[in-house]
Image (cartoon, rainbow, N blue to C red):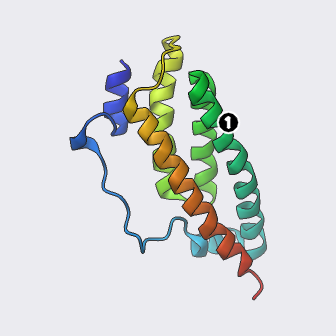
Amino acid sequence: AAAAAAAAAGIGSASTVRPSASVDEPLFAWAQCVDEYGEDLAASFITRFISSTQERRRLIGTAVAACDWETIYKEAHSLKGSCAYVHAAQLAQLAYELQVVAKVEWQAGSNREPEPDVVDLVARIEELTSRTLEEMKAAVGCVGS
């Protein structure tokens, strides 16, 4: 069942690996945030996202090490939802992929260690999170200038 969920989420084999986004492609849509929320509220959302995401990625890392699939699922789900508010589509997609696999493992009562593909997915989330947060910090630093 976990393999089917992984395949549905797009992980588990070389043929399902999605190409990385272009280096020039923005990691979140600042202009869309401003259009949707206004500059001040968008900056507030981004600032809260940065803070909560740093804690969330720590919790995911701890949960992966402990094989705590319920926490992995809940934190990946929360990350996915938070990404939607700030228009961080690439990170939302990876969080969704982790959420799908973790839900299957959690519902099956699994306490087994994550497969290498899941470990790789968590590493990609970590790397993309770092890059996304840096881009967000730069955008919020530009507010009002």
Horizontally, residue 43 falls left or right of residue 125, namely: right
**In the image, what residue type sits under mark 1?**
Leu
Residue at the image point whose x is 62% and y is 28% from the top: 63
Q: Secondary structure at mark 1?
A: helix
Q: Is residue 46 above or below residue 60?
A: below
- Quadrant of the image occupied by residue 132: bottom right
Q: Position of residue 2 (x, y in %)?
A: 38, 21
The quarter in which the N terminus is drawn is: top left
Q: Position of residue 67 (x, y in %)?
A: 56, 21
Residue at the image point whose x is 49% and y is 44% from the top: 123
Visible residue check, residue 142: yes
Question: Which residue occupies the extreme bottom position in the image?
Answer: 145
The quarter in which the C terminus is drawn is: bottom right
- Quadrant of the image occupied by residue 120: top left
* Residue indicated by mark 1: 59
Horizontally, residue 104 falls left or right of residue 19, namely: right
- Quadrant of the image occupied by residue 12: top left
Task: Decide: few, some or many residues near mark 1? Use Cα within 10 Å; few <14, some 14-19, many ≥20.
Answer: some
Visible residue check, residue 87: no
Question: Which residue occupies the extreme top position in the image?
Answer: 109
Tell how many labels: 1
Residue at the image point whose x is 70% and y is 57% from the top: 50
Residue at the image point whose x is 63% and y is 61% from the top: 133
Q: Position of residue 137 (x, y in %)?
A: 68, 69
